[in-house]
Image (cartoon, grey):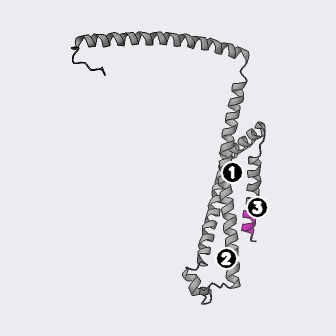
Amino acid sequence: MSLQMSLVFGALIGQMGILVLLLLPLPLSVRTKIVEIYDLLGNSTNVKVGIVFSVSLLGLSFIDCVQRLGRYGFNSPYFTNFNAVASQGNLTYDQLATKFYTQRNLYLNGAVLYLTLSIYTMITIIKKLVKKEIEYRNLSQINEGEFASNEEEIAKYKELIKQKEIDIKTFKKQVEGLQKSYNDLTPSNETSKTD
């Protein structure tokens, strides 16, 4: 395995370890630290440039592997013109070895790109979970003084609701009076039952 593919394989193993760590049901304090570290690294320009550069190289390598594998397809002109025996489906050992290495590199690069996307998605989910859990804990730890002030607000709003209900009853009476006045103005034989 070349040095490049050894680095890619190391990145794959590292990403799998990070993903397993993110999937574990960790306590809030540990998840908060993970989110803080991610935010700290996300704010660093050097880290952003490194990630973009690495993903770009892996993407180019992935595309190169796909193109190389296209040479060994049965419909490829390279495949049929390279060897007369090859058109019958037989590949030489060198071609088989190249195809194997290309497939291996394709799978490694694809897995690293996929896990990069998976880690980003998991971090986003964990950020939302940490935010919601902190909000939940803050709401559940309301002390008695705040509870008393909440009761005062509730009483105030109940009074406001009663006043609005009185206003609604008044508006209903006004509408009935207007409807009655309208009905008195129109001749009784022209009104229908739907009015």
Which type of secondary structure does the marked residue at label 1 adopt? helix
Which type of secondary structure does the marked residue at label 2 adopt? helix
Residue depicted at 66% across the width and 57% down the height: 114
Q: Position of residue 99 (x, y in %)?
A: 67, 76
Q: Amino acid at mark 3?
A: Gly
User: Dot 1: few (<14), some (14–19), or many (≥20) neighbours within 10 Å?
Assistant: some
Q: Which residue is mark 1?
A: 119
Task: From this view, report whether residue 5 is shown above or below residue 161.
Answer: below
- Near-viewer residue (95 or 172): 172
Task: From this view, report whether residue 74 is shown above or below residue 112.
Answer: below
User: Which quarter of the figure is the C terminus placed in?
Assistant: top left
Q: Amino acid at mark 2?
A: Lys
Residue 99 is tagged as 2
Q: CA distance from mark 1 to mark 3?
A: 16 Å
Q: CA distance from mark 2 to mark 3?
A: 22 Å
Q: Which residue is mark 3?
A: 10
Q: CA distance from mark 1 to mark 2?
A: 30 Å
User: Dot 3: few (<14), some (14–19), or many (≥20) neighbours within 10 Å?
Assistant: few
Q: Position of residue 135 (x, y in %)?
A: 68, 30
Q: Is residue 128 left or right of residue 3?
A: left
Q: How many marks?
A: 3
Which type of secondary structure does the marked residue at label 3 adopt? helix
Q: Is residue 81 visible?
A: yes
Q: Nearer the viewer, mark 2 or mark 3?
A: 2
- Near-viewer residue (117 or 42): 117
Question: Which region is colored magenta?
Answer: 1-11
Task: From this view, report whether residue 143 is shown above or below residue 38.
Answer: above
User: Which quarter of the figure is the N terminus placed in?
Assistant: bottom right
Residue depicted at 68% across the width and 51% down the height: 119
Residue 50 is tagged as none
Q: Is residue 75 left or right of residue 146?
A: left
Q: Of callouts 1 and 2, which one flags the residue occurring earlier in the amino acid sequence?
A: 2
